[in-house]
Amino acid sequence: MDRAHRKASRKYRAIHRLNETARILDRAMDTNGIMPSEKEPFLNWVITSMWNNFKQDRMNRRLVIENEIKDLKLRFPNGTVKKQYSVFFSLPLDKISDITLDGIEDLGLSLIIDDNGLCSLAGRPTQVGDFTLKLRYNTIAGEPRSELSIPIAFNPNPRDLWKNIPTDPNILFFKPDSECEYVKVESKVDGMPCKDIVAASQRGRSHAQEGKPRDDHFRLFHCDDSDWYVIAVADGAGSAKFSRRGSEIACNVVVEECKKRLTNNPAFEDAIRDYNAQPEDMEKRLRMTNYVHDIVLLTALKAHEAINTVAAANSENVRLKDFATTLMFAICKKFEFGWFIASFWVGDGAICILDTDHKIIKLLGTPDEGEFSGQTRFLTMPEIFRDPDLMKKRLRATIVPDFTALFLMTDGVSDPMFETDKNLNDYAKWEEFYRRLTNGFPEDAIGGVDLSDDNEQSKEQLLKWLDFWSQGNHDDRTIAILY
Amino acid sequence: MRGEPIESVKVGLESMLSSLRQEPFALESVNISIITFDRDVKQILPLTPLDELQLPEISTPESGPTHTGMALKLLCNRIDKEVRLSSPDQKGDWMPLLFIMTDGKPSDVQLYREMIPEVKKRKFAGIIACAAGMSAKTEPLKELTDSVYSLDTLDSASFKKFFKWVSDSIGVGNRSIGATDELQLPPPPPEVNVVC
């Protein structure tokens, strides 16, 4: 048989089978009593309804897959603008194909899907705000592309949002938004270096944001004749409207009162010498503590009274608690046997002697803290001075051979640096603090403070250091260091 | 609350979140939790930092009782679990603020009254109650707090204003508290009526 003949034979068989099918279909319609004129409309009807069934089934299969994708409950966590963002999720590649996540390019993100359906959405978000991404994919051939909206939000970087609005200089009790001071004590005739004091106070970002004044304050004093050092640090309560004045009065009164009581007071110094010679002698101890009581406690009381007087002198709707402030101060003097340090402390913050040579710290009291952040006690609370445990709680007197530094700081510094009471009592944390103070925070381009003798520039360094970043800690910051 | 008013609440909440996110201090320190109450009481959002927060769906039934008392009970329970207090080992959270909004009145009056002293024990920096719409009753809210406000219209513009004011109040609450006993709220917008 030649090729043409074989081809004709195949064609003939095909036509024969088709005719056969048509005849069977025709006979079936005859058997069911379908009139010849109704045969075509009937076949049309059959095909239409079957086609609809087919489409319905195909759509149902698409919807099942769409629900499956929806049930994955894809949620993208919020990101922060310009900070690396990355999220992983899985998609069933056996059920869906041609996946796109529309809208990501505009946001600076890209999507990578591996062969197993593991998806990675990553990048550095370029825009702040709430956005909706569209996940689009194919399911069943012939069905339209499926779509799922997924919200995504990028927060601004809080560091970019802070404003520095200067305080209106015309407000009542205005004070500069920052301050720093260095008290240089010249070396003695023997050439031995003397300890200096450096202090800085910076308005907190939460105040700068609203153009509100700094509530913290400090005052330093060194008496060249008697060689007494006086250091006072106070933190005006954020919620009290004239606390900036309260903290200022407190520090001023401390310096003036201590100056008065320490200059030319050989009896007190003798009592300290006697006590040091025989520390176990109760009488000598009592004599020394009586002096401390008279000088330190009465100074604190004077500060309380001075604020009270100012509050009372103002108009009727000004109350003492509008001047609420914490207060910590120390009087220090170097004797031939070592350093005498006496202190008073009400409120939060920290006052501590650090000795890195002997790896010891001496916390001069305990911070007053409530159950919640921001709760404390204030110098302006009259009950402070009625407390029978006042002396034990708030007064300290101690003699140490020498020390690296004496720190007085408000909670604007101690909260971010130590966080808890437990850490405040931990030498390692103080060593860490000292390291951060002297090395700075290179990752945030904040320099350290060079605490070498007579370095007067350390006051500016310290002020700049106070701008360190700590999430959620943006209170006024004040620190005074005797070193 | 359902239908358009609850949609307006959602719009208001969304705009409150976006305005809070523009405040650096809020962005770093605010945490928000949401409890819905109708026939059922649900904490639809556990205490979540603002920067991580995504608003969940708020669904409400067609009608039924308003279990405000049960809501306060759940609130106390969650506060005790989720708000951290200061201890030697951990730094405490800021005092929480409570905003309560209702368009009706408590159906579980007895439980509501029992829970009021419990809520007050939890030491909120402030409790701000809002009666939303004409059928909301302010009297029960006055038993809970001295800061009761009302909204006449329940459209999204009013809720946006209300929540803007809420976010301003959150800003104020997030300061050291202790010197003054009471929270000084910023003045409310004209849409928000001061009840007491």
Image (cartoon, coloured by chain):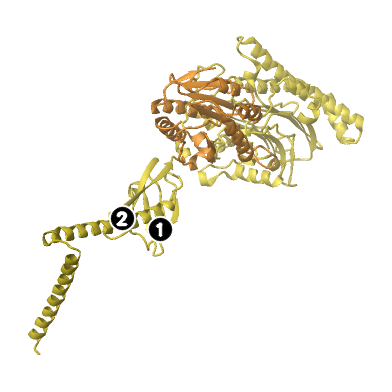
Is disc 1 on the same chain as disc 2?
yes
Q: Chain of mark 2?
A: A
Q: Nearer the viewer, residue B157 or A398?
A: B157
| Helix, strand or loop at mark 2 | helix
x then y, percent, for residue A131: 37, 42
Is residue A299 visible in the rendered structure shown here? no
Residue A66 relative to residue A449: left or right: left
What numbered label is drawn on residue A91? Answer: 1
Q: Residue at x 53, y 46 (%)?
A: A442
Q: Earlier in the sequence, mark 2 or mark 1?
A: 2
Rounded to the nearest angstrom, the CA distance separating label 2 from label 1 is 20 Å
Q: Amino acid at mark 1?
A: Leu
Q: Colour of chain B?
A: orange
Instruction: Look at the numbered discs 2 and 1 and tell me whether their residues touch, using CB distance below 8 Å.
Output: no
What numbered label is drawn on residue A59? Answer: 2
Q: Quadrant of the N terminus of chain A?
A: bottom left
Q: Amino acid at mark 2?
A: Met
x then y, percent, for residue B107: 56, 28
Label 1: how many Cα within 10 Å (few below 14, some 14–19, many 20+) = some
- Give the answer, above or below, for where A41 lies relative to A357: below
Which chain comes out yellow in the rendered image? A
x then y, percent, for residue A341: 76, 33
